[in-house]
Amino acid sequence: MKSSRDSLQEKAKEARTKLDAHVREIVDWHFDPETGCEFWLDYARKLDFDPRKEIGGYSDLKLLGHFEDQWLRGGPVLKWVPKALMDQPKYIFETGGSTGVPKSRVNVNDFQTDYELFSATLSDEGFPQGADWLMLGPTGPRRLRLAIEHLAQHRGGIAFFVDLDPRWVNKLIKRSNHEELELYKEHVIGQALNILRAHDNIQCIFTTPKLLEALCEKINLVKMGIKGIFCGGTEMNAQFHRFAREELVPGVDFVPTYGNTLMGLAVNKPYDPADNYAIIYYPPQPRALFDIVNPDNPEETVAYGETGRVMLTTLTKEFFMPRFLERDEGERAEPIEKFPWDGVRNLRLLSSLQQSVVVGVY
Amino acid sequence: MMHIPLIRAGQPYKSLNTTGVYDFRTGRQVAELSQANSGLIRKDFALAQRNKQSLDALPVHELLTICKNAADLFATADLPLDGETQSPDDYVRAISMTTGMPQSLARRNMEKVCVVLREMAAVLGGLTRGLDLSILDQGWGTQDDRSLSYLCCANTLGAILPNNSPGVHSLWLPSIPLKVPLVLKPGSQEPWTPYRVAQAFMAAGCPPEAFSLYPTDHAGATEILLRSDRSMLFGDVSTVRAWEKDRRVQIHGPGWSKVVVGQDKIADWPQFLDVMVDSITINSGRSCLNASAVWVPSHGREIAEALAQRLAGISARTMDDPEAELAAFVNPIVAERISSLVDSGLAQGGAQDLTAKYRDGGRLVEVDGATFLLPTIIWCEDPEHPLANMELLFPFASVVEVPQDNILEKMGSTLVGTIITENRSFVQEALAAPNIDRLNLGLIPTSRISWDQPHEGNLFEHLYKQRALQSTIPVAV
C-alpha cells in the first residue's frame, strides 16, 4: 500500500511532466512565426539558438534569461498579441502603478479562464451558486473588475461594484494627507454599505484587507448574510488572516488570494488550524508557477522553508513571461495533495524594497 | 524567547506578527514584540467609551492613591512579563541593552517616572492650577464661590512614543487620574517602560480597561492618531509635520531649547557655566529639554572655549559603569551620519568644533562594542550658520553671539528658554516672546523640570475644556 508521501511524490512527478509538456507547447506557440507575437519573434531573432528546439521543459527556460517588467511599460501593446489571436477582441489591463509607469498586459480570454479555474476551488457553501457579489476595490484599468464580474456570472450571480482608486490613495499617503484619506475611505465604504443594504442576494464579497477592516467597522457582515469573502489585492499576513477569521468575519468562508495582472490567481492552502493561520499560496500550474530563489543568485532555488525571492513564470497562449523576478519574497512551501507543486509561505514585499515602495494601503 | 504581548484594554494578546527587540551591542534578539495590525486597533476603539467608564467610576482621590501605589510597584516590585516577572534591575538592564542608555541614566529616568506617579496630586495641581479635583468626578462644582464645570473631551489619550529616553513617559501618566484611558504605541526599542507602567497600575488596582498597548507599524500609528480624541505625538520634524494642524494632536517634536544670557549679566558668565553644562549634558543630551544652543550678546568665544573644556571631560563608558553619563547609539550608522552632518557644517566655514582639540581622537568613538558621539561645542560666528540652531541626539550645542535686542526674535522656536538676566525690560520681552514655550528665569538649567508646571502643552487643557455653567439646582455631594 502506498503511503501518502509516495502518493504526493507521484502526483508531483505527474505535475512536473505535465508542466514540461505545457512549456514545450507554449514555447512552440509563441516562437512559431505563424502563431507567435511580434515581441517574442523579434527576441528569437537575436538569439543564437531556436527556442523551439532547445527548450524541452521548464528548466530549459533559463536559456531565455529573466523577463523584464520594463518591457511591459509603454507601447505598442499589440507586439504582445500572438498572430493567431490578433483577430480576437482584446482587453488591456494595467498593474496598480505603485512602482512607476504601469505595466500593461493584453488579454483575450485568459482572465476568464483563470477565474473559472479559481471558481473550481471555491466551496458552494461559502460562495453559493446563484448568489450575487459585491466587489469593493480597485476597478479602473485593472483586470480585477472584469475578472470578478466573470466569476460572479460563471457562478450564476451578478456583481455589484464600488471603485477605489489606489493610485490616488498612494498619493494621499505619500503626502501624509490623513484627513483626505479618511474622507475618501468613508466615501468608498459608504457606497458599499448602500449596496449591501439594498440588495439582499449579495452573499459574496471580493475586497482588500484594509477595505474589509473598514467595512467591518460599520457593519456586521455575518448578520448581513455574507457567506464568503474572497480577499486579495495587497499583502496579507498570518495575523490579518487570524484577525479576519476570529474577529472580523467569524464563520464566514474567508479565502485569501494572491493575484496580479501578470500571473493570474494563486490560492491559499485550504484552512488548517495546524498552519497557525500562515498564508501559503499555490499558483495555478501549469498556466503559471513560481520558484523561490536566492535573491543574490536567482539561478539557485532555495530549500523548502527557506526565504527567497519570488520568480514568476506565466505560460498561456496569450502571454508568455518566463522567470520574472517579482518584488516579493517568502518561504518556499512544499507541494500538497491538492497542489502538488511548490508554493510560497508568508509572501511579503522584498525586504530590500520595503522603504521605497508605497504598497497598496487600500 | 521572551515575548511582549499587546495589551488590549488590559488583556494580553499575542500577535502572530512580531518584531525583534535586540541587544544593540551584540545584535542578539532579547525579546519578541507582538505587532498590532491596524484593523485590530480600529476595532478596539469601538470600546473606548466603555473603557472610559471604568475610570469614570473611580473618584480622582482614589486614582491618586492608585498612582502612589503604582509608583512603589514600578520602583520596587517584580511585575508580570510573559508569564514570568521583571524585577526593577531587569527593567534597567533591558532599557540599557536595547536603547543604548547607560544603566545609571536609566535608573535616573526610572526615578523621574516614580516621582511623577508619587507626586501626582502636585502634578495635577500644577496642570489644573489648583482646581478642586472632585469637580472632575461630578463634572461640576463650586470653588471660591464660583460655579465651575469641566467637560472631558476624550475617551482615549493616544500616544506615539519615542525610544530616546524613558523619562518622557512621565508626560502621559496624568491621563489616568484625569480619567482618560491610554492607547499607547511604544517605541520599537523601548516597549519596556510603557509595559511596566501599565503592569504597575493594574497591580495597584487601576481598571485594566485603561491600558491599551499596541506596538505597531506606521499605519497602526496613524490609526491611533486618527481615532484618539486626543493624542500626543513624539517625533522628528518630518514625523510631526503631517499632524501639526490637527488640534487633537499635541506635538512633541524637537525642542531647540536654549540658554540666553542678558547684557546685564554677561560679564559674570563663568558663574553660569554649570547651568549651561547641565542644560546641554543632562540625560546625555537626548531630551528635548536639553539646550542645543547658548545665545549671548558678547564673550561668545570665551564661553564656547570654557564649555568645550568642561564637556571634554565627559567620556564614553560601559553601559554598567555607575559614572556613565553618555548614551550610545543603537545604530552606529546614525552616529556616523550625525557626525558627518556636523563636519559638513564645519566645512562651510564660519564655525569651529572647539571640543576637537581636547579629544585624543575623533568625535565618534567605540567603547565595549558601543558607538558614541562625544560631547561637541561649536562656536558659530553667524546666527544664520546651519549649525547655530541644530538639535542632535547627543550633548551638542552651538554658542552664538547676537546683540541682545535681536536674540529673542532670531533664536526661533524654543521649547525651554533659560534666560539669565535681571533686566526687567528683557524679562518682559521674554515673557512676551511667543517662540518660547517654557520659560526659566534665572539660573535654572533647561533640563530641570518642575512637575507642577505644565511641559510642552498642558495635558489637562488638552483633555478637558471649561464649560460655562449656570444652575438653579445645588451641586450633588
Image (spheres, coloured by chain):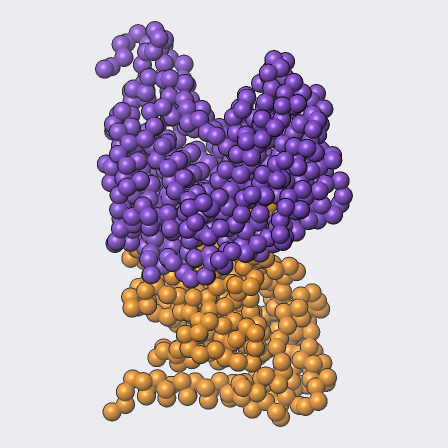
Chain colours: A orange, B purple
User: Total number of numbered labels?
Assistant: 0
Which residue sits furthest right?
Answer: B349
Does residue B253 show up? Answer: no
| Front-lying residue, B364 or B322 | B322
State the image quarter where residue A129 is shown: bottom left
How far across and down, in percent of the image, does residue B436 sit? 58, 26
State the image quarter where residue B400 is shown: top right
**Residue ID at (53%, 38%):** B281
Horizontal placement of A113 versus A229: left or right?
right
**Residue ID at (63%, 32%):** B294
Vertical comparison of B370 with A315: above or below: above
How far across and down, in percent of the image, does residue B63 sit? 28, 29
| Front-lying residue, B278 or B197 | B278
**Residue ID at (44%, 60%):** A236
How far across and down, in percent of the image, does residue A50 sit? 66, 90
How far across and down, in percent of the image, does residue A36 sit? 65, 82
For the N terminus of chain A, give its image quadrant.
bottom left
Does residue B454 show up? Answer: yes
**Residue ID at (60%, 87%):** A28
Vertical comparison of B156 with A334: above or below: above
| Front-lying residue, B453 or B174 | B453
Vertical comparison of B96 with A322: above or below: above
Vertical comparison of B247 with A206: above or below: above
